[in-house]
Amino acid sequence: MTTLGAIGATPQPGSATKKAFGNTPEGQPIDLYVLTNRGGTEAAITNYGGAVVSLKVPDRNGKLADVVLGYDTADGYVNDKSYFGAIVGRYGNRIAHAQFVLDGKTCTLAKNNGENSLHGGIKGFNKAVWTAKVLSTKDGQSLELSYLSKDGEEGFPGNLKVSVIYTLTDANALRIEYSATTDKRTVVNLTNHSYFNLAEQGSGDILGHQLMIQADKFTPVDASLIPTGELRDVTGTPFDFRKSTAIGARIDGDDEQLKLGGGYDHNFILRRSSDLRASLAARVVEPTTGRVLEVWTTEPGVQFYTGNFLDGKATGKGGATYPRRSAFCLETQHYPDSPNQPKFPSVVLKPGERYHTITTYRFSVEK
Ligand code: BGC
């Protein structure tokens, strides 16, 4: 093990360590970086897909538990189909019929989700080996991951230089800062696909977690989970999470949208206080442990997904199994299918511009 910023074989508070995590099928080595803050909170991140492999945060009695789903080995991530913990790009979420028109030219992508493109295509950013660099920043330990997505990769135009900086702060937050530049007009929508279970990964379903989302509207979908274009008011629907409500309270009702998603799998339109500064998007409380997760973001939307497609077949960390609805995702993002929906906020990045978004997962406890 190479130790960076601290001495010793086991992670020390306020340190970052690096160890071998395995190889890609092509034989390229993959590493695991363990960031630890002064309170003992720990985030392990691999440069394969930039995935958050584990995140150990305290409960109301100070007991640490790993609150994200994942795998013990690199092979788990190589074979993964659920995007556990990964950086998703070049376009997170769905693009209808795997194509869009940009500057009069049709860009054709791979259909990897029925007729649609999902999460960047067949070999998205979640399957790339990123270049990693440990940084010691003023508020914590950071890991900078860089990746060059070549012109034409997965059908997207332009060489896209991407940087993602993960920072584990001493205030128990995991901040993710995404930046990108391009040499041709392209579309970009980056997110992180962590699956959370605040009781502990592998400990059962998340239906008892209490959720608040700061959204007055959401984007209803069709049968292939593509937004219809409507921005629907949440009032009087099971999508109204403006007051904290148990995730499971309405999930199996006869709402047409919940039936289409097999549960929640929808983009919520965030109420934002400013376009430049991060706003509170969502707050989740797990009542038995008191763990609280707040999601803050500069993004206009969040995909709330209740792990409806998890089937319990994958072997997770420590032999855990992950059945349906054993975790939830809050993927901060631009709205799905924006490249084909002129009324949605634009996802076009032009040469000379810098894509820059920040999302922070803040952990705390409630008594
Ligand atoms: C999508 C789900 C999908 C999951 C894993 C989520 O972002 O909304 O429909 O199954 O990612 O790919």
Image (spheres, rainbow, N blue to C red):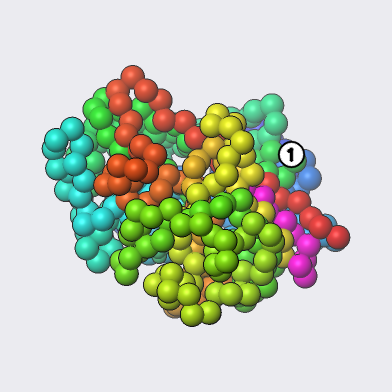
Residue nearest the observer in this picture, 129 or 150: 150
**Which of the pair 119/344 is nearer the observer?**
344
Residue shown at the point (51%, 54%) measured from the top left: 217
Q: Is residue 26 left or right of residue 320?
A: left
Relative depth, front residue between 67 and 295: 295
Which class describes the residues within 10 Å of circle 1: few (<14), some (14-19), or many (20+)? some
Would you identify the image quadrant in which residue 287 lies?
bottom right
Is residue 288 shown in magenta? yes
**Rendering quarter of residue 266:** bottom left
> Does the image show residue 318?
no
Asked whether 21 or 62 is in front, the reply is 62
The quarter of the rendered structure image containing the N terminus is top right
**Residue under circle 1?**
170
Q: Is 353 located above or below residue 115 in the figure? A: above
Say left or right for 346 vs 97.
right
The residue depicted at 14 percent of the width and 42 percent of the height is 106
| Magenta highlight range | 287-295
Ligand 1 image position (quadrant): bottom left
Residue 356 image point, x, y percent: 47, 31
x and y percentages locating residue 100 in the rendered image: 21, 46
Quadrant where the C terminus is found in the figure: bottom right
Tell me what residue is drawn at x 81 percent, y 57 percent.
Answer: 366
Secondary structure under the numbered disc 1 in the rendered image: loop
- Which x, y percent locates residue 181? 36, 27
Magenta stretch contains residue 10 = no
Percent from the top left, x then y, of residue 148? Answer: 33, 34
Amino acid type assigned to the residue bearing label 1 in the image: Asp
Say whether residue 360 is left or right of residue 355: right
**Eyeballing the image, is 113 above or below 125?**
below
